[in-house]
Image (cartoon, coloured by chain):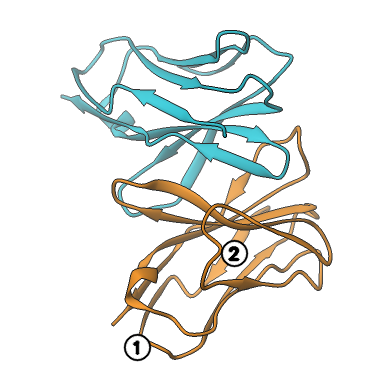
Chain colours: A orange, B cyan
Amino acid sequence: EAQVTQNPRYLITVTGKKLTVTCSQNMNHEYMSWYRQDPGLGLRQIYYSMNVEVTDKGDVPEGYKVSRKEKRNFPLILESPSPNQTSLYFCASSFGDREGYTFGSGTRLTVV
Amino acid sequence: KQEVTQIPAALSVPEGENLVLNCSFTDSAIYNLQWFRQDPGKGLTSLLLIQSSQREQTSGRLNASLDKSSGRSTLYIAASQPGDSATYLCAVGIGGDMRFGAGTRLTVKP
């Protein structure tokens, strides 16, 4: 089944403890993106990647890192999480500019 | 900077009614426009994708139109059902980026 898989689905962590949210797609998509969704602010892009080893900042990249070493994987790294990074995170992928995006099921992160 | 606006923010209708959701964007230089559905606490399900060269797309009871020159799109839902209750998001594709509207929360009452 064609899909975008995020793990974990739910995560509660403490301030400052490094964490990684994984994202994998099995559709051979070139484009991958990370978004966060917050009440009243909607979906905002964190980082995106248009190919292996090519990443760019979105609207809210502060406090996050990404890497794209393989086409199928696009992990989101929080080196030192803070409570303001508590949010619902989505990974998405697409074939390219003229194709639609497929979204993962989301990761609900709580930083205490 | 591209801004996407959705009106209304919330809508409540009786079952069986036809309805229209609106989406507007400020920059017409888009590659595509995509409508999504999101149930509470869940992921985004793609409903319709309209390429910038297209005027509309249809899927079942859903019809989406795109007027790029005026920066507008509408999602028409025919014969609404309680199962259609969800938040509907529109997003414009601009290269590797997608810009989302804040969504319209739809409630269809039995």
Q: Nearer the viewer, residue A70 or B29?
A: B29
Quadrant where the N terminus of chain B is found in the figure: top right
The residue drawn where x is 45% and y is 21% is B23
Q: Which mark is residue A5?
A: 2
- Circle 2 — which element? strand
Image quadrant assignment for residue B39: top left
Pointer 1 local density, CA inside 10 Å: few below 14, some 14–19, many at least 20? some
* Discs 1/2, front: 1
Say whether residue A64 is left or right of residue A108: right
Give the spatial CA distance, label 1 vs label 2: 24 Å
Q: Chain of mark 1?
A: A
Q: Could you tell me residue B94's position as x and y percent?
A: 68, 35
Image quadrant assignment for residue B71: top right
The residue drawn where x is 52% and y is 67% is A62
- Residue bearing mark 1: A14
- Circle 1 — which element? loop
Q: Could you tell me residue A100's position as x and y percent?
A: 66, 37
Say whether residue A42 is left or right of residue B105: right
| Above or below, comparing residue A112 to residue A86 in the picture | below
**Kind of residue at disc 1:** Val
Image quadrant assignment for residue B8: top left
Q: Nearer the viewer, residue B75 or A112?
A: A112
The residue drawn where x is 51% and y is 16% is B73
Q: Residue reaching furthest bottom? A: A17
